[in-house]
Image: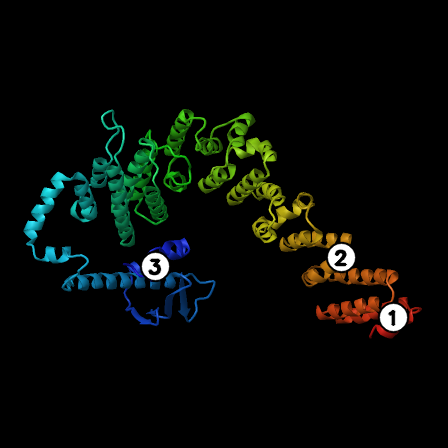
Amino acid sequence: MESPLLQKLLFLESIFDETDFIQGEAMFDSNTFPVTIKKSRGKYSVSLEERIVEIKLKKGQLDLEADPPIPKSQDKTELVFAALYLRKFLQEEQERAKEKEKSKPRARSKSNPIYDLLEGIPKEKILLFLQSYSRKDNHFAYKLQSNFITNYSAEDDKYETLLNKVIKPKSEKSPKLSQKDIQTFNQILETLNAQAQDLYSLQKFKELFDLIHACLKKIAYFEVVYQTQNPRVEKVLTGMLDMLYRMSKRDLAPAFNKKIVANLTEMSLLSYYITESLDNTIYPILFEHPLLDKDQATQILDNLVDKYNKIDKGQKGKTLLAALLISARYPVTIAQYHEVFESSDTIPALNTLLAMKFYTCVDKHVEILVKDEALVKDIALLQAERYLVEGDHERALEYYLVWVKYEPKLFELVKRIQRVNLEVLEANKAGLIKSVEQFSDEDKAYIFSGLDMEELLMDLITESQSIVLIKKYDRDLLEFDTEFVEAFYSQWTTNYLKEHFGQKSIDTIESLMIHIQSIGLTKFAKKLKTELKNQYNSRQSIADNISS
């Protein structure tokens, strides 16, 4: 059994930035300098040429620290290299432990005397028994075959051949699966899934793809043709799709990548490849793959249209599939949009579309957005991100300003809009003001400040005459317009003393003067005090209590 640390190390590409991982992998493959590994109190120290990388698990997550530390501006290639080296070391250590365990004489067990029995029988007789029993019991033969299939056969279709024996084509003679068939299928899938994980860790991707491809096709047939849903099968399906997705993101040979796309495209066209949800399918993998060409995409979508037209109107998956098709490439009317979305759980559909980067019809049918606030938010953000990637900052801002009205998290809002060119923001001040008009003054100020829109921030502070806002943002505004800050404080204190009397007003002014001095306006604070004393010389409390 793999250690928890090794389990985390098997999925390094999901932890590191893609560029860092590729460079670290290249460094690992071409390494010539000696590397040493030391273990101490549950952590490993990997000594490289210029630094030591300490690797351990911290609260269940992989924790890597370099000594000397790696600057933030520098890539993490050395961390990736160290992690890969430790992974190889632990895998080899695990294999040695397995071999050592095999060489040990097996202890006698009262609870399982079969071990004693097997040790006392010649291997030839055991072999003859297995051959004889396999001929009598097909299900036993299939399970036995699945346990050793990765090693014993080099045939390209060995996985498909095995699975076809277990789940046979549906016919009048065999319209249903027996409980034994289903149980055997579950066990074989779980066995193959374990072997797939081993193949992934060993980076035997061609063998891995053949295994996963065969399993995905048979699972689809099992679920759709026999109309059988099984949680054990679904768990295997999820795990295999995850491995396939991560494998598709790796830098594999172009010819092999083309084979992956071609085979998955062919699988998507199968008449029985119809799912109730787009989430747990090959479609996200296909449509995100850089080698999927236009003809293949068109073929897939045309096939989906045909399947959509055949789906029973009450089927749960209908609306998700329709959302995919409509937003992908087919021109539709507003009425058709309504037909799809009114009976649909739209958010999962839109999340799927976002993952697949399908946007093209939204611009033509923006009227639909006003019908559903949750839908507005998702589509507007989707479109904004798309235009930003394409470099069209004006259109990106247009959709961001729609999205702003429905996004309650100010940090998230500012973080995204910050990526729009400042010139575009400046040119669309009126639109930005209108989009945030329902926000509080404090939230507006946070947004304007975060977007470096100092003029809008100053206009807001002037209009609101808020001493709270000016004190919060005066340090930033000093760098932009010192005169504005001084003029505001001068005007505000004058107006305040006109309307407020007594010791409390004096305390407020004194506290404000301390703040003004703390932000570096010491000379201005002294000047303002003098002006206030002169202006209100008839009020003895001001002359006596405001310090010079």
Q: Earlier in the sequence, mark 3 or mark 2?
A: 3
Q: Secondary structure at mark 3?
A: helix
Residue bearing mark 3: 9
Mark 2 residue crowding within 10 angstroms, few (<14) / some (14–19) / many (20+):
some
Q: Between residues 373 and 73, which one lies in front from this camera angle?
A: 373
How far is disc 1 from disc 2 in space, using C-alphas? Answer: 23 Å
Locate residue 64 relative to residue 91 in the image: left or right: right
Place of residue 445 in the rendered image (x, y in percent of width and height, measured from the top left): 68, 54
Q: Which mark is residue 32?
A: none
Q: Residue at x 55, y 25 (%)?
A: 335
Q: Are marks 1 and 2 in contact (CB under 8 Å)?
A: no
Q: Position of residue 176 (x, y in %)?
A: 27, 30
Q: Is residue 453 visible?
A: no
Q: Which residue is disc 2 drawn over?
A: 466
Q: Earlier in the sequence, mark 1 or mark 3?
A: 3
Residue type at numbered disc 3: Leu
Q: Secondary structure at mark 2?
A: loop
Q: Residue furthest right?
A: 538
Separation of residues labelled 1 and 3 (CA atoms): 70 Å
Question: Looking at the rendered structure, which numbered label has been put on residue 542?
Answer: 1
Quadrant in which the N terminus is drawn? bottom left
Task: Classify residue 26 as left or right of residue 374.
Answer: left
The quarter of the picture where residue 262 lies is top left
Residue 139 visible within the image: yes
The amino acid pointed to by label 2 is Ser
Amino acid type assigned to the residue bearing label 1 in the image = Ile
Which is nearer the eye, 185 or 473?
A: 185
Task: Classify mark 1: helix, strand or loop.
Answer: helix
